[in-house]
Amino acid sequence: MDLKVGVIGTGAIGIEHIRRINEKVQGAFVTAVSDINIEQATKLANQINAVFFETGEELIASSNVDIVVVTSWDPTHEKYVLEAIKHGKYVFCEKPLATDSAGCKRIVDAEIAAGKKLVQVGFMRRYDRGYIELKRAIETRQFGEPLMLHCAHRNPTADENYLTPMAIINTGIHEIDALRWLLQEDYVSAQMILPKQTSFTHEKLHDPQVLILETTSGIHIDLEIFVNCQFGYDIKCDVVCETGEIGLEDPAYTHIKSKGKNYTEISPDWQTRFVEAYDYEFELWVRSIQTGKLAGPTAWDGYVAAVTMDACGKARESGEKVKIQLEDCPALYK
Ligand code: NAP
């Protein structure tokens, strides 16, 4: 039987995921929505023939909802995920799982107490074809050991609400998870460098920023986060190994030859760049629930990303290299 999905948060990505579930994913459809923006959510509910709930808690408790998607504002993620665990319902939560590591730990503890994995975090890079191919190539060690990764996460523009810490909490967190997953290694330290700023930023955002991470075996990662780069949404990941380099290509299905130039276009935004990864992520999430084998990024992955995120905050403030120390991974997540 098709799974009935309740979605909390009907903003930019909430609407995309609702369309994705209803129009692309087999085995699930959206029956309920909730958002503090009542006008926006009720309008959407009417369009898709779903029920509107005034609160996320009521939506989660509803017998018309089997599984939950949380796409609301970051600070609300923790309470909705905890509520879904309380009701024993599978929950997909957009990143970040919580706004700090303490919040993620409360989720991990609740899941362990429930005795079952119920949470998946929206780290969709793991479903992108380029990253999947990179991971396979690294795993074979065909070019020897990976030694260094040079990465960039660039957005064309960021608005006045985008503040300095968001470069990690909202943007770099994707790489923090994806690179740990690619290398199958945890991080041991984080350092932040704040270079010369672009004139396109505002006073509450230092842009660009550079994050330096070191893994347990000593692999060096540098990640440029530049959210006012002006030219497009640009993701780079080059893995330098002992006898070769493996890197992400800019995905493009066509090229343009015109006026003496031969070029491909750069994605304008994350929706376009990762649309196939989001589709695949949801297809596998629904299938894994149907087969009882949840396999995507876990609450523990969300926690580890948040510990790293907290270390980045301290590193930015102090200008120092900050150690990252994790507790042992609980049995539920091994
Ligand atoms: P958005 O457009 O601002 O949408 C968030 C929605 O949540 C808004 O409608 C907001 O209402 C609503 N909301 C706020 N507080 C709420 C509450 N207590 N209960 C229910 N709804 C509430 O933001 P977005 O871009 O869709 O992002 C949503 C989440 O997805 C964020 O956590 C973000 O980090 C994540 N995200 C992930 C990716 C990815 O690549 N995986 C990409 C984009 C976003 P108001 O507008 O009235 O505040």
Image: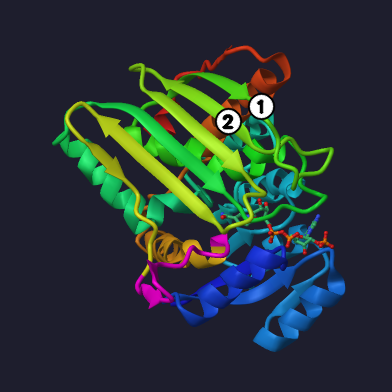
Element at label 1: loop
Question: Which image quarter has ligand 1?
Answer: bottom right
Q: Quadrant of residue 51?
A: bottom right
Q: Which mark is residue 116?
A: none
Magenta stretch prevailing secondary structure: loop
Residue under the point 69% across and 49% down = 83
Crowdedness of circle 1 by 10 Å Cα count: few (<14), some, many (20+)? few
Q: Identify the residue position indicated by label 2 in the image.
A: 210
Identify the disc placed on residue 194: 1
Asked if the beta carbon under badge 2 is closer than 8 A to the nearest atom of ligand 1, the reply is no
Above or below — where is 160 with respect to 102? below
Write the residue at 64% across / 55% down.
Answer: 230
Q: Give the answer, above or below, for where 253 lies relative to 295.
A: below
Q: Is residue 294 visible?
A: no
Find out whether residue 74 is within the magenta segment: no
Q: Is residue 198 above or below residue 43?
A: above
Stretch of the chain drawn in magenta: 253-270
The earlier-in-sequence mark between 2 and 1 is 1
- Asked whether disc 2 touches disc 1, contact meaning CB atoms under 8 Å apart, the reply is yes
Quote the CA–CA distance across marks 2 and 1.
6 Å
Residue 202 image position (x, y, % from top left): 81, 43
Query: What amino acid does circle 1 point to?
Result: Leu
